[in-house]
Image (spheres, rainbow, N blue to C red):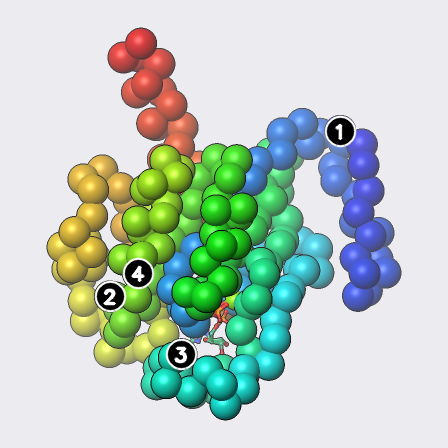
Amino acid sequence: MDSATTCEASRVPLPLPQTASRGVKIAVAGGFGVGKTTFVGAVSEITPLRTEAEMTAASTGTDDLSTTPAKRTTTVAFDFGRAALSPSTVLYLFGTPGQERFEFMWRTVLKGALGAVVLVDTRRLKDSFRCLDWVEDAGVPYVVAHNVFGREDQEHSLDDVRDALQMTPGVPVMRCDARDRQSVRGVLIALVQHVMRLADLQRRQS
Ligand SMILES: Nc1nc2c(ncn2[C@@H]2O[C@H](COP(=O)(O)OP(=O)(O)OP(=O)(O)O)[C@@H](O)[C@H]2O)c(=O)[nH]1
Ligand SMILES: [Mg+2]
């Protein structure tokens, strides 16, 4: 593959390496304000495409800002970023909107995805159920990543998170910091390994 991408914001040409031979779509999903846009932005090697809109008084009572009081904008369509996982494999990252009124976009974002990261915030775990249902219904393999916002939400063990979310056995659960590139890369590597394990299992069973 020998293509070039131009970052609109910086006007810096960022060519894909000539060794890149595989492009893979990955969805980054989760409830409102769990850190999806932050996650995509932290790892993207191009200036991420964002579709943020200012939050207005109209969202009062609908959007829970108690855990992210500094939040001023919300994703209204999707986030897009690109990250090379290896010289040959490039991930195209699509972040979903979090608000339920934009759920119609979730199907589009999940369509054709090789895998999904479901980000959760342990202070608002119940907000994750709808998203998990969407991802499971779409049949997209996924991992759950607990985005750690502070010390208090590290008190929950990953087993607690798994139990609280009534997760399907075998789905990996891990912690991450959505602001940290290495941490986000770790989640993406775990997702790709999980997808490869499932594919291998399927091959053996057929
Ligand atoms: N302390 C801390 N803050 C974070 C972390 N991840 C995201 N944030 C902050 O939390 C807020 C929400 O992050 P976003 O990335 O906009 O969340 P989102 O899931 O894309 O939100 P929606 O698109 O509105 O659903 C922002 O103010 C981020 O700066 C984290 O790991 N730690
Ligand atoms: Mg967002």
Closer to us: 104 or 199? 104
User: Which residue is most to the top?
Assistant: 206
Sequence order check, earlier mark of 3 and 2:
3
Q: CA distance from mark 3 to mark 2?
A: 14 Å
Q: How many marks?
A: 4
Provide residue 187's location: percent of width, then percent of height.
42, 50
Q: CA distance from mark 1 to mark 2?
A: 43 Å
Query: Comparing marks 1 and 4, which lies closer to the viewer?
Result: 4
When asked about the image quadrant of residue 99, the answer is bottom left
Element type at marker 2? helix
| Residue hosting label 2 | 126
Name the disc covering residue 100, or none: none
Q: Amino acid at mark 3?
A: Asp
| Residue hosting label 1 | 1
- Label 3 residue near ligand 1, CB within 8 Å: yes
Name the disc covering residue 128, or none: 4
Say whether marks 4 and 3 touch (CB < 8 Å): no
| Residue hosting label 3 | 63
Query: Comparing marks 4 and 3, which lies closer to the viewer?
Result: 3
Element type at marker 4? helix
Element type at marker 3? loop
Q: Amino acid at mark 1?
A: Met
Provide residue 19's location: percent of width, then percent of height.
71, 29
Q: Is residue 106 left or right of residue 202?
A: right
Residue 192 seen from this side: yes
